[in-house]
Amino acid sequence: MTELDWVPQSCTLPTEERPLRIAEWDALFTEHLTSLSRPGAQRLRLEFSGSAQVADRTRDLAERESGCCSFFTFTFTFTADGGAVRLDVAVDAVHEPVLRALAERATRPAGLTEQR
């Protein structure tokens, strides 16, 4: 399995841009991810620490991801007083393996374990 094997055929992001997008996610996970949970097989909850700038970065990345992978549904929440950013990610049953791969990818650089 190569680095990009988990990216589905339905992704419209040009192939040459995919490593850059993955690097953006990896950097966000490494720098700010504080917890990850799977409330269901087709849902992932990512929580990040940070300021309004982290919130903007997270929202921007999620919006761009929605543009090329329309099967993702992102729900974004930012609590300014606590500096907490939450990103809920949902997919249909067909794309559950992609969500699983994203969760696995998130746990690696952040050194977290997935919670159910």
Image (tube, grey):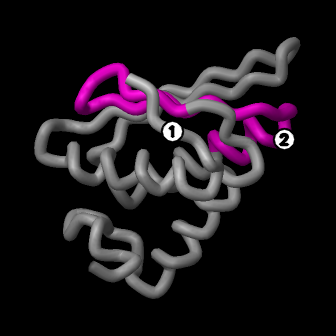
> If the image is split into quadrants, where does the N terminus sit?
bottom left
In the image, the segment drawn in magenta is 36-59
Label 2 Cα crowd, 10 Å radius (few <14 / some 14-19 / many 20+): few
Q: Secondary structure at mark 1?
A: loop
Residue to which mark 1 is pinned: 113
What's the residue at 25%, 32% (across, down)? 42
Q: Are marks 1 and 2 in contact (CB under 8 Å)?
A: no
Q: Based on the picture, tell me whether residue 56 belongs to the magenta stretch.
A: yes
Q: Secondary structure at mark 2?
A: helix
Residue to which mark 2 is pinned: 53
- Identify whether 84 is placed above or below 27: above
- Identify whether 93 is placed above or below 86: below
What's the residue at 46%, 87% (across, down)? 16
What's the residue at 74%, 35% (across, down)? 55
What's the residue at 62%, 57% (across, down)? 109
Q: Where's residue 92, x and y in %? A: 18, 37
